[in-house]
Image: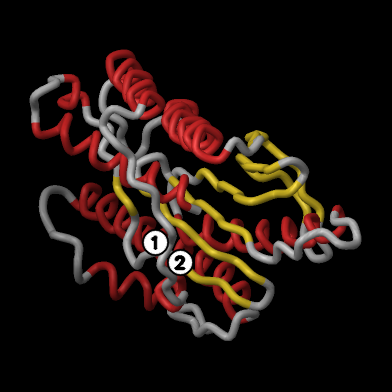
Amino acid sequence: MVFPSRSTCEKQDIKHVGVCGSSATFRKNIFRKITQNKESKMTEITLNCLIVPVLAKYGLDSDGIDSIPLFSPPTYEIQDDNKVFKRCMEEILGRLRSYGTLQPDSLEAMRNEYVVALLHASIHIVMDITNKDLSMKPQYGIVGEESRGRVDYAIKEAEELICITEDKQHKVPIGFAQNIKQLESACETNKKKRKRGDNDFDYLYGIVTTGRDWHFLLYSPGKISKASDTANLIEFSRKALEPNSKSYQSLCDSVKEVLGIIVGI
C-alpha cells in the first residue's frame, strides 16, 4: 500500500479550502482540512486492516462487511400485552426521562443501559416460552486457539454459550471483526466443555450493537453470515415520552422487532 507524500496531500487539500480572511486564517483552514483528511484516511485504513483478514478466512473479498452473505433469522412475534415487553418499555421510558434522547456519541454507560434492558427482556421471554434456564454474563472471558479476551455480554444455556454480544459506540466494522473472532473462540469453548454423547451444537449467534443500531450474525465453523445488509434501528428519542405520538409507536415497534429477533435466535 502506497501512502501519498505530504506535499501531494497538501496540494490536493488546498484545492478544497476556501481562501478568505488573513493568511493566518488561510493557513489554519489548510491545516484543519489536511488533519481531517488524514484522520479519515487512517480510519479507513485501520478498518480495512482489521476486517479484511478476518473475512478472508471465510473466502470473502475486500468489500468489508458488505461481502458477508445473508441468512434469514428465526423470529418470535412480540405481542403488545406481553408483560416482559411492557416492563422493558417502562425501563426504556424511565431512562429517556433521565437521560434524554440517545445520541450517536452518547456515553457508553448510557448506551449500555438500553442494551442490557433489551437483552434481559429477551432472556426472560425465552425462559417464559421454553422453561429453559438462560443466563447473561457481562465481561465474560473466552479463550480460543487464535484469540482470547472478554466479550461485552454472553448469553448461556446451562454451560453452553449460545449468543455473544459486542457493544460498539462507533466503527461497526471493527465490532464485526471482534465479534467474529469471539464467535470462533466461543465455538471452541463449547466443544471443550461437551461430554461424549452430547448434542453437537456447532453454531452460534452474534450481536453487534451501538444501542441504536443492531446487527445479527450467524457463525458455524468455516462460515459466517448476517441477518441484513442494514441495521435494525431503534430511535431512543425523548419525543417518545408522549404516549400517543408517532415517536412512541415507532419506538414500541422497533423494540418489538429487535426483541423478536433475539428471542427467535
- Which sits earlier in the primary sequence, circle 2 or circle 1? 1
Q: Is residue 108 visible?
A: no
Q: Position of residue 63 (x, y in %)?
A: 43, 79
- Looking at the rendered image, the quarter that the N terminus falls into is bottom right
Residue 151 versus residue 224: which sits nearer the camera?
224
Mark 2 to mark 1 CA distance (whole Å):
26 Å
Query: SS class of the residue under badge 1?
Result: helix
Q: Is label 2 or label 1 in front? A: 2
Residue occupying the point 42% across, 30% down: 114
Type of amino acid under label 1: Ser
Q: Position of residue 15 (x, y in %)?
A: 20, 71
Residue 51 versus residue 240: which sits nearer the camera?
240
Q: Residues within 10 Å of mark 2 (few under 14, many from 20)?
A: many
Residue occupying the point 18% across, 26% down: 240
Left or right side of 191 for 9: left
Query: SS class of the residue under badge 2?
Result: strand
Q: Is residue 82 visible?
A: yes
- Asked if the residue at tag 1 contacts the one at tag 2, i.e. Cβ–Cβ closer than 8 Å, the answer is no
Q: Which mark is residue 8?
A: none
Q: Which residue is tagged 1?
A: 40
Residue 179 versus residue 263: which sits nearer the camera?
263
Task: From this view, report whether residue 29 is shown above or below residue 67.
Answer: above
Residue occupying the point 61% across, 63% down: 180
Q: Position of residue 142 (x, y in %)?
A: 77, 49
Q: Position of residue 168 (x, y in %)?
A: 49, 46
Q: Which mark is residue 226?
A: 2
Task: From this view, report whether residue 73 is shown above or below residue 209.
Answer: below
Instruction: Name which quarter of the figure residue 17 lies in.
Output: bottom left
Left or right side of 255 for 208: right
Type of amino acid under label 2: Lys
Instruction: Name which quarter of the figure residue 242 lies in.
Output: top left
